[in-house]
Amino acid sequence: MSRCTCCERPRARPASRRGRRRPGPARAARRRRRLSGVPVVGVRGPDVQLGVPGAARHAVPGGRRHRGGAALPRRMAPRAPRRRPPGPRTRSPRRTRGDDMSQVAQMHSGVEPAETPLTPESWGKLGMWIFLAGDAVGFGTLLAAYGAMRATSADWPNPYDVLGINLTAFMTFLLICSSVTMVKALEWLGRGDRGKCNMFLGFTALGGAIFVSLQAYEWTHLINSGLHVDGNPWGAALFGTSFFIVTGFHGLHVTGGVIYLLSMMRYVANRPDPAASYNAVEIAGLYWHFVDLVWIMVFTFMYLL
């Protein structure tokens, strides 16, 4: 008499085989076959008798056998094949790095820069800076020559004993104040007040005119004392030569600056829009500040040292 094996309790695996796992690829292949319904030889679960009572009740996905019955294979719904749309097949063009860069350039082609580098305002400032750079080289050369002559002359007079330091100090203070009024003129023009801008421009020009007048007075006093371009009663003759050349060169710059500021006053008055004349006044301010800075250097090297 044959025994019914469907309700038999499966034998326990030996202790030596417990915890072991089959190799990864083989185990995965068996699992795929079990899920697809193909019987696998030597594996429990897929090939069962459907006539056994209670088999369907105890079946679980994956085809693994349980105590109460056998497992049934899980049927998977067939996947619909992909269909190619009618018409000729076209290949997309191969993208290169150059194509990506060209697309990025097209995306940013409509973005305008914050400031165009070649504007009339920029050209005006650039021209003034070039002029000031050349002027700085000229003043630097004159001061360097003055220092060389002073270092090589044994009978060079002391500037503090010959020149009027108190008067020159007041002239220096006057030029510094004129720089402050120049800054205030540009500030009020930026606020849109042309009247106050012209007022401070007038103060600046007045300070420059007073400076030139005091320098002319100083020259007259020194000439009457015997100091000339080719002569010096207190020592080396080159002292008078260097003094008149350096201070005269700076005095010409101050005189030109006064005329420049007066023309700026007329320029601002004839422009209804303050913004239209702001750049021109700013360029004039660059020139005036440079003249003041140069005088501080001249005063330090020729009067104090």
Image (cartoon, rainbow, N blue to C red):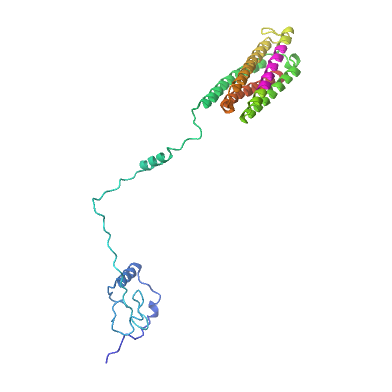
Tell me: residue 189, above or below residue 30: above
Residue 74: which quarter of the image? bottom left
Quarter of the picture containing the C terminus is top right
Q: Most prominent secondary structure in the magenta stretch? A: helix
Quarter of the picture containing the N terminus is bottom left
Q: Residue at x 53, y 22 (%)?
A: 127
Closer to the camera in the image, 154 or 53:
53
Closer to the camera in the image, 133 or 193:
193
Residue 202: say if magenta.
yes
Please state the horizontal and vertical placement of residue 83, each as a whole percent of the image.
26, 58
Tell me: residue 180, above or below residue 22: above
Q: Farthest residue toward the bottom? A: 1
Q: Residue at x 53, y 26 (%)?
A: 121
Residue 206: which quarter of the image? top right
Residue 141: which quarter of the image? top right
Tell me: residue 75, above or below residue 80: below
Q: Is residue 234 visible?
A: no
Residue 165: say if magenta.
no
Q: Is residue 223 visible?
A: yes
Please state the horizontal and vertical placement of residue 170, each as a whole percent of the image.
74, 20
Closer to the camera in the image, 141 or 131:
131
- Report the number of discs: 0
- Left or right: 210 in relation to 84: right
Closer to the camera in the image, 89 or 297:
89
Please state the horizontal and vertical placement of residue 248, each as a whole percent of the image.
65, 13
Please state the horizontal and vertical placement of residue 273, each as a whole percent of the image.
58, 27
Query: Which stretch is magenta?
Result: 201-218
